[in-house]
Image: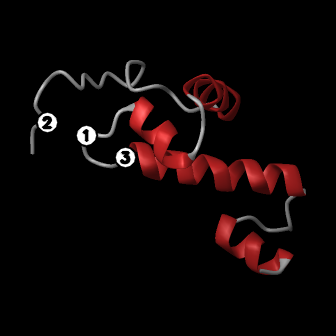
Amino acid sequence: MTLEELSTWLNVKRPPKLPDALDEIERRIIITTLAKKGISQTDAARELGYSEQSFRYRLKVLGIKSARERGIDFGRPLQE
């Protein structure tokens, strides 16, 4: 993927700096994984190959709210 293609994919006008681009890609992968119906943070960490501690750290660094912060209770049945 070229920087121009990456810019288009990230919807930005100019190519991002590599660390910023990698953070955005990681953020999107984590959010997509967490959005799976009924997946817990622990399951998402395991699926993505993180330790639970590393996963919580990455959520914080990337500004992604935990399920608890988003008001999701995995003890309740999901409403459709």
| Of the image marks 3 and 2, the number of the one nearer the N terminus | 3
Dot 2 corresponds to which residue?
78
Front-lying residue, 25 or 40: 40
Front-lying residue, 10 or 39: 39
Circle 3 residues within 10 Å: few <14, some 14–19, many ≥20: few
Three-letter residue code for mark 3 = Ala
Residue plotted at (90% across, 56% down) = 17
Residue 61 drawn above or below residue 69: below
Apparent side of residue 25 relative to residue 45 in the rendered image (left or right): right
Q: Which mark is residue 35?
A: 3
Circle 2 residues within 10 Å: few <14, some 14–19, many ≥20: few
Dot 1 corresponds to which residue?
38
State the image quarter where residue 15 is shown.
bottom right
Circle 1 residues within 10 Å: few <14, some 14–19, many ≥20: some
Disc 1 element: loop
Nearer the observer: mark 3 or 1; the answer is 1
User: What distance separates the C-alpha of mark 2 from that of mark 1?
Assistant: 7 Å
Residue plotted at (85% across, 68% down) = 14
Do tag 2 and tag 1 residues touch (Cβ < 8 Å)?
yes
Apparent side of residue 7 relative to residue 32 in the rendered image (left or right): right
Do tag 3 and tag 1 residues touch (Cβ < 8 Å)?
no
| Of the image marks 2 and 1, the number of the one nearer the N terminus | 1
Which residue reaches farthest right? 17
Q: Quadrant of the C terminus?
A: top left
Apparent side of residue 53 relative to residue 5 in the rendered image (left or right): left
